Every structure is written in structure tokens, then in C-alpha cells.
Image (spheres, grey):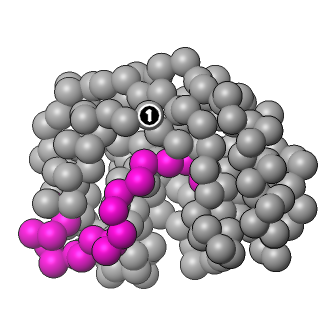
Amino acid sequence: MPRLFAGIEIPPSITTRLSLQKGGLHGARWIDEANYHITLHFMGDVDRPMANEIAFHLSQIRYPEFDLTLKGFGSFGSKKPHSIYAAVEKNPNLLELQSEVLRRMAALGLRSDKRDFTPHVTIARLKKTQAIDVADYLQRNDGFMTEAFTVHRFVLYSSRDSIGGGPYAIEDSFDLL
């Protein structure tokens, strides 16, 4: 049974910039730059017939290319931080694409995450990291910003059942117009 999610790849020039932000935080397990992505929707563990349905429905999405910029860092888990991420600058095109993916997955009976969509690129998973250390890391890297990059496609990733962070494989890709 594959574990699937739809996402946006991060180009090598941006992954290199992100990888330079690694270090200086006790208890951080830094994500390999080959696994950096922006998740649009997590489908979870599905059987092969459902995986084929998911790929078909995603292939029907018609949306234009758009540009994204990463700006700043944040963390999830305010009192007990569990991950560090690079934030995606607000972008209505990204929100519309994500909404369309959600709509199509809902038509297949796949539920969406109950949390609001926070576009981001996870760069580290944290274990026993103090909130004050996370705050210091975020402050030290406060001015981080990338150049804009064009999103030419989105992809269907698979992952093995693990504690998060990859490895991920691209199962299918869907070009934007």
C-alpha cells in the first residue's frame, strides 16, 4: 500500500540555500535537501486502485504556472516545538491550486487535514529541543528570503512509513499550463 501526497518540488538553487541553514540547533534532525517540498495534500496509505484514481484526478487539474518565494522561518508546536520550516510567502495562486487538489481528493472520499493550510518547506524535525533554542534559531535566521522560482508542475509523491522526512519518490507529475 503506498503512502501518497501531492506536493511542489523545490528547485536545486533554493534547496542549496535552505541546506545552508542547517546546524546550530540541539535535537534537530535536518531533512535531506532532496526531500524538500511543499505539501499540497496528504492522502495517506491507499491501495493501488485508489492510487490510480488519485493520479487520474490530479491529471485533470488545469492551472497556470506561477512564482513562489520562501521568506522567513517558523516552527510548529509552540510549547513543545516539533519541526522547523521555511515559510512560503503568501500567494493566491498556490492557495487556489491547493484548493483544487483538495476538492478533487474530497470527490474521491479522501479527507483533508483539519488544520489550516500553512504552505511551508520542513527543514528539520525536532526531538527534545527547548522552545527557547528554537526561538533563538528563528531569530538568528530572521532575514532569510529566496529569489522567486516558477512552479512548472506539481507531483504525486510516495513515502515509506517512517518518522517523517523521506525518502520520497515521485510517482507521477502534472504540468501546469
Judge left or right: residue 9 versus residue 12.
Answer: left
Q: Quadrant of the C terminus?
A: top left
SS at badge 1: loop
The vertical placement of 108 against 75, above or below, is: below
Q: How many marks?
A: 1
Residue 62 lies, with reference to residue 26, above or below; the image says: above
Q: Residue at x 15, y 78 (%)?
A: 109
Picture coordinates of residue 87, whole percent (x, y): 53, 42
Which amino acid lies under the numbered mark 1 shown in the image of this protein? Glu
Range covered by the magenta-colored residues: 104-122
Residue drawn at the location 27% of the way across and 71% of the way down? 112
| Image-quadrant location for residue 128 | bottom right
11 left or right of 16? left
Residue 50 sits above or below residue 74 on the image: below
Rendered residue at 67%/51% (across/down): 123
> Would residue 172 be counted in the magenta stretch?
no
Give percent across and percent down for residue 127.
78, 74
Residue in view at x 60 percent, y 37 percent: 72
Q: Position of residue 48 (x, y in %)?
A: 31, 76
Q: Is residue 40 left or right of residue 58?
A: right
Q: Does 147 sit left or right of 108 as displayed? A: right
In the foreground, 108 or 100? 100
What residue does disc 1 label? 89
- State the quadrant of the N terminus: bottom left
